[in-house]
Amino acid sequence: MSTEIVKPVVARTWLDRWDRQQEYFVADREERFTVIGDVLAQVVGERPALLDLGCGPGSLASRLAARFPSAAIVAVDTDPLLLALARATTPSTVRLVDADLADPDWPRHAGLTAPLDAVVSTTALHWLAEPALAALYREIAGLLRPGGVFVNGDHFTDERPALAALAASVRTERARRRGVTSNENWTQWWAAAETDPDLGRLVAQRRERGIGGDHGIGVSLQGHLNLLLRAGFRDAGSVWQFGDDHVVVAVAG
């Protein structure tokens, strides 16, 4: 397990660059974060227990910690570089865990015991193949208290090709109007990180773990909803959409 920490001033610079390059793909990323928080505000109490899956450098976890200052947040990822940035920038209410969500033992590695009020994720789970995603959803359903929610912000393709193409074009035009198409993109960010003396060793570590590559958009929106219902959630649907960018919510039974 990686426990390396990058100097806060260095981490903040790279995190700011990360947020900008993520907006290259998700022009309304901040609004998506806010919507996720809006959903939680309707469900959780004063001291909620939250779990962030595929937390990356802690972008969502940090925003939720600011909005819910009494929350206990566990954030899970397996990328050593992104976790190092998170360790240097997230508040103390966020407990970071190095664990692979494709490993069935990830809840044990995360030390999860008490029922959770909410599980969240953003731009992370699309890389899981359908069998691993189904297993993850079953695990999440078992971790949540009755009435708790799973909230996932991501790109979800439509199973109907014509609508999928139109939704993708709506997202592209939105990005153009927002002026983010000239931002540094994913490939450029990682190429720059590899040459940075503070991050180069962490890039090598993630390569040793087999992390990397463009995973694209995997299971369709309807596929996600079907898997959530089969996992035991009583309701599942999209509560916010722009093009193929959705916030999906599933309510535990």
Image (spheres, helix red, strand yellow):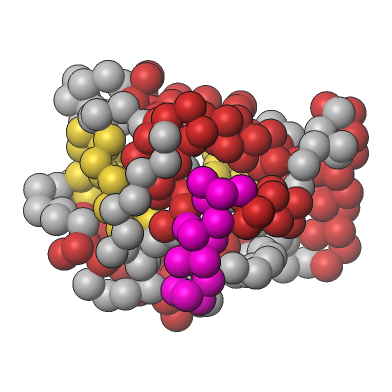
When the figure is inspected, residue 183 is found, relative to residue 34, above or below; the finding is below
Q: Quadrant of residue 175?
A: top right
Look at the image and tell me whether residue 40 can be seen: no
- Residue found at x 82% / y 52%: 168
Looking at the rendered structure, the number of numbered marks drawn on it comes to 0
Q: Is residue 248 left or right of residue 170?
A: left
Q: Position of residue 152 (x, y in %)?
A: 48, 48
- Residue found at x 80% / y 37%: 183
- Residue found at x 75% / y 51%: 188
| In front of the other: 221 or 139 | 139
| In front of the other: 127 or 185 | 185
Q: Position of residue 100 (x, y in %)?
A: 36, 67
Q: Is residue 182 left or right of residue 66?
A: right
Q: Position of residue 72 (x, y in %)?
A: 21, 33
Q: Is residue 40 left or right of residue 111?
A: right
Query: Which portion, as a residue range, is magenta?
Result: 196-211
- Residue found at x 62% / y 57%: 194
When the figure is inspected, residue 187 is found, relative to residue 71, above or below; the finding is below
